[in-house]
Each structure stands twice: as C-alpha cells, then as structure tokens.
C-alpha cells in the first residue's frame, strides 16, 4: 500500500553537465502526470512518461528535469544593424540630456536584446544518457517515500477496521435482544387494547410483520461482507484506494440502516462509533494510491 503523496530530489554534476531531477505528488482521483523538461529534451519526454507510469497508478505527479552543460557547443551571431540603431537611439537620448554620444560604452550596446544571439546545440540522446541514471535514482527514492507513508496509512486503516469489526460483532450479539424487544412491544400493544382477549395468532402475525420490517440480520450479514472485502483490499491489493472508497459507501449504507432500526441506546452509541471509524477510513483512503 502506497500513499499518493511523495517527494524526491537530486542535483549532481555529471561531467560538465549540472543535472537536477525533482518528482513530487499529491492526491488525485486518477494519474495526472505533468512533465517539465527543457525544449531540447522533448524527444525523450515519452520515455520519462513510461518510466513514471510503470511505477505510479494514482496521484497528481509533477516531474521536473533540468540539465545545463557548460561545454555544450554554442554559436554566437551578431546583428550590426540592430547595434547601430541602438547606438543612434541611445545617442539621441544622451544629447537630449547634454551628454556626449561618444561616452556610450560598448557593453551597453551589446547588452541590448537582439544584438548578440547565442544558439546552443544539444544532442537529446547523449544528454539523456547522463540524466537517466539520476532520474531512475530519484524515481526509486520517490516511490520509497510514498511506500513509507503508505505503511503508516495502512496501520491506521487497519486500526479503524478493527473497530468496525468489533462494532459488527456487537450488532450481531444484540440482534436477538432487538427481536425480543419487537415481540414484547407488539404483545404489550395488543394486551393494552384487548386485554386477556388478545388473539395470540394475530400477535404472532404482527410480530412477524414487524420483524420483517425492523430486523437487522441482513444488514449485519452485508456489513460483515463489506468489512471482509475491505480487509482483503488493504492486505492484498497494492493499489486499493478506489476500492476502499467504494466499499466504504456500501458499508455506510448498512450502518445507517442499523441505526435507523435501533431500539437500544447501546446500539445507537455503537452506530456512532462505527460511523466515526468508517469516516476515518474513507478520509485516509483518499490518500492511498
């Protein structure tokens, strides 16, 4: 079980290249992968995507790769026409404020946009050969970080599931008392209205009708089934997040029905405990991959 949140970063010098890789993620219903690389690495972006998708199933994942090679080939071109136009324009401003155009430094002209243009040539394949080992190391560290947090999430989920199991056992234990309460209630009503002339067959019919309406046997059976399914997902499914949320919705329906049929304050109190534990599972489940 992995968390959907994680972080890893590394920056190294690989020969003449300064390489940095950062991977971070937060919760998301699906895999939302955003890759940010320099334009010259666009040809290898699909490889980065395959590497991440092979190890991550859910979460909003941001991948940032930077590479600066101090020895990369560069071509510098000059635009003399632009330089002259800058010189004339700056000279006009200088004369307007009483300065000499001859005092304008060359560095000021060269610093203007478009006077000098630098074009660097990169070989995406050779760059990726330097970046790939660093990227794989950061990706493994990122996955390990998600897994470490997932261990804590799993422990909390199982702790709340244990609470739900105890609540389910409590409901099952009290079910006969609930049915006895219904029988007593029907018998008391008939005795109050008819006294000793109450028809026992009618009492039995009414009791059976109330038991059909108010018994929680089916809800208890379904609840235990949902809890068993939850435990199986947590223990066997490496990416149980979506299933946990769905099963919790089903379990919540059964707990609500048990609460609505309850005739005992003890059961009502246990329903509150069950709903609290289930809500904790749903909240934590939204952090699980």
Image: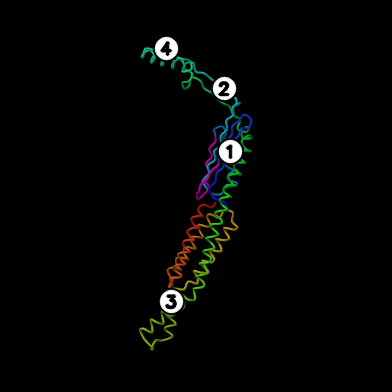
Q: Which mark is residue 210?
A: 3
Residue occupied by mark 1 = 10
| Nearer to us in this view, 237 or 12 | 12
Q: Nearer the viewer, residue 104 or 113?
A: 104
Q: Are marks 4 and 2 in contact (CB under 8 Å)?
A: no
Q: Which residue is mark 4?
A: 101
The range drawn in magenta is 23-37
Q: CA distance from mark 4 to mark 2?
A: 31 Å
Query: Which image quarter: residue 70?
Result: top right
Q: Residue at x 50, y 53 (%)?
A: 286
- Pinpoint residue 192: horizontal percent, then vertical percent: 36, 83
Identified at 37% across, 87% down, the residue is 195
Q: CA distance from mark 4 to mark 3?
A: 104 Å
Dot 2 corresponds to which residue? 75
Q: Nearer the viewer, mark 4 or mark 2?
A: 4
Query: If you read the primary sequence from the N terminus, does the residue marked by circle 4 or circle 1 appear first?
Result: 1
Q: CA distance from mark 2 to mark 1?
A: 30 Å
Q: Residues within 10 Å of mark 2 (few under 14, many from 20)?
A: few
Residues packed near mark 1 inside 10 Å, few (<14), some (14 to 19) or many (20 plus): some
């Amino acid at each position: 079980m992995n968390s959907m949140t994680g972080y890893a970063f590394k920056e190294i010098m690989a020969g003449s290249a300064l390489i940095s890789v950062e991977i971070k993620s937060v919760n998301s219903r699906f895999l939302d992968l955003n890759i940010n690389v320099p334009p010259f690495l666009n040809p290898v972006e699909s490889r980065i995507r395959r590497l991440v998708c092979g190890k991550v199933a859910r979460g909003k994942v941001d991948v940032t790769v930077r590479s600066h090679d101090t020895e990369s080939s560069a071509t510098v071109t000059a635009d003399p026409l632009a330089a002259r136009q800058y010189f004339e324009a700056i000279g006009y401003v200088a004369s307007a404020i009483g300065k000499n155009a001859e005092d304008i430094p060359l560095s000021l002209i060269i610093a203007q946009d478009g006077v000098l243009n630098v074009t660097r040539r990169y070989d995406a394949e050779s760059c990726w050969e330097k970046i790939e080992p660093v990227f794989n190391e950061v990706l493994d560290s990122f996955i390990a970080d998600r897994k470490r947090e997932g261990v804590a999430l799993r422990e909390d989920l199982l702790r709340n599931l244990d609470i739900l199991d105890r609540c389910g056992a409590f409901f099952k234990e009290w079910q006969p008392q609930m049915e006895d309460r219904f029988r007593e209630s029907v018998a008391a009503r008939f005795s109050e209205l008819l006294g000793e002339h109450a028809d026992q067959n009618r009492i039995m019919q009414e009791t059976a009708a109330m038991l059909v309406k108010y018994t929680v046997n089916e809800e208890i059976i379904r609840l235990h089934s949902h809890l068993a399914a939850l435990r199986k997902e947590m223990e066997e499914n490496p990416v149980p997040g979506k299933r946990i949320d769905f099963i919790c919705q089903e379990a919540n329906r059964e707990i609500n029905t048990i609460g609505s049929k309850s005739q005992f304050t003890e059961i009502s109190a246990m329903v509150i405990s069950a709903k609290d534990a289930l809500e904790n599972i749903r909240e934590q489940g939204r952090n699980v991959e």
